[in-house]
C-alpha cells in the first residue's frame, strides 16, 4: 500500500472514523493505566484513511482544564499509531503535569488535532509573517538551529492577536519575545479537529 504523507483538511473524517480515533485514544490510555503497555487495540491496516501517514496532537482536559497535550508535527507513522502514541504521551509524559490516574480518566475529555503537512513560508521579517498569518486557522512552527516550537490553531482561542501569538510562540521555543533572525524557519499548517 502507498502511504500519503499528510491529510487534506478539505476531506474531513466521517463520524465513524472520528469516533474510532477517539475510542482508540481512550483505550490506549486505559490499557496503559491498567496494564503498563501500549495495546494493539484496533487494526487499521486495511483502512486507507486511518493508515495514511499523518501527524497529530492529542489534548486532554480534566474538568475543563488542560491536563496534557502532546503530539508530532512531522508525519512519521500511520495516523492510528500516531494518535495512540500521542494519547499515551499526553496522559503520562507531558512534563507540565503529573501522570493521569484511573480516577482522572473518567473526568477527562479527549480532543485530537490531525495536521496537514506544514507549508514553509518565506519571510524576511516578523512583520512579513504577521501579514501572512490567518488568525484562527493557521498553526505555526518556528525553528532555528535545534530550537523548535509550535502552536496549534486552537491556541488562537486564548491568544487572538497575531503579534502576541508569535511573541508567545517564540517564548515557548526559548527565544526572547522580541527576537527575530533571518535564519528563522517558518511553517504553517491547518488541522482537522475531533473532540469528544
Image (tube, rainbow, N blue to C red):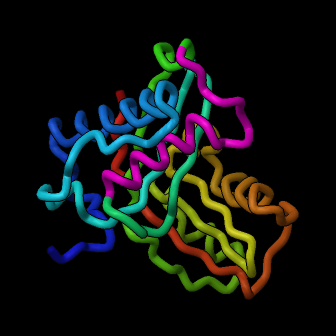
183 to the left or right of 77: right
Question: x, y (%) of residue 48?
Answer: 15, 61
145 to the left or right of 31: right
Question: x, y (%) of residue 187?
Answer: 54, 73
Residue drawn at 87 percent across, 63 percent down: 176
Q: Is 44 drawn above or below residue 74 in the view shown?
A: above
Overall secondary structure of the magenta section: helix
Q: Quadrant of the N terminus?
A: bottom left
Q: Is 179 drawn above or below residue 14 in the view shown?
A: below
Question: x, y (%) of residue 157?
Answer: 55, 39
Closer to the camera, 126 or 190? Answer: 190
Residue 153 on the magenta span:
no
Q: In which quarter of the image is residue 77?
A: bottom left
Q: How many labels does the image show?
A: 0
Residue drawn at 59 percent across, 54 percent down: 151
44 to the left or right of 76: left
The part of the chain drawn in magenta is 79-102
Closer to the camera, 126 or 151? Answer: 151
Q: Quadrant of residue 110?
A: top left
Residue at the left extreme, as displayed: 46
58 to the left or right of 178: left
Q: Quadrant of the C terminus?
A: top left
Residue 85 on the magenta span:
yes
Residue drawn at 23 percent across, 73 percent down: 3
Amino acid at each position: 500500500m502507498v502511504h500519503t504523507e499528510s491529510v487534506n483538511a478539505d476531506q474531513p473524517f466521517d463520524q465513524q472514523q472520528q469516533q474510532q480515533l477517539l475510542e482508540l485514544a481512550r483505550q490506549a490510555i486505559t490499557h496503559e493505566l491498567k496494564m503498563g503497555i501500549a495495546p494493539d487495540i484496533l487494526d487499521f491496516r486495511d483502512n486507507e484513511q486511518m493508515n495514511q501517514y499523518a501527524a497529530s496532537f492529542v489534548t486532554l482536559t480534566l474538568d475543563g482544564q488542560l491536563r496534557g497535550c502532546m503530539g508530532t508535527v512531522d508525519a512519521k507513522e500511520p495516523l492510528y499509531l500516531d494518535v495512540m502514541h500521542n494519547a499515551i504521551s499526553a496522559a503520562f509524559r507531558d512534563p507540565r503535569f503529573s501522570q493521569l490516574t484511573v480516577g482522572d480518566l473518567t473526568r477527562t475529555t479527549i480532543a485530537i488535532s490531525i495536521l496537514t503537512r506544514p507549508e514553509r513560508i518565506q519571510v524576511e521579517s516578523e512583520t512579513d509573517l504577521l501579514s501572512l498569518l490567518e488568525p484562527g486557522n493557521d498553526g505555526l512552527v518556528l525553528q532555528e538551529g535545534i530550537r523548535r516550537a509550535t502552536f496549534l490553531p486552537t491556541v488562537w482561542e486564548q491568544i487572538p492577536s497575531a503579534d502576541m501569538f508569535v511573541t508567545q510562540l517564540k517564548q515557548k521555543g526559548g527565544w526572547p519575545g522580541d527576537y527575530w533572525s533571518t535564519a528563522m524557519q517558518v511553517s504553517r499548517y491547518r488541522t482537522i479537529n475531533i473532540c469528544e
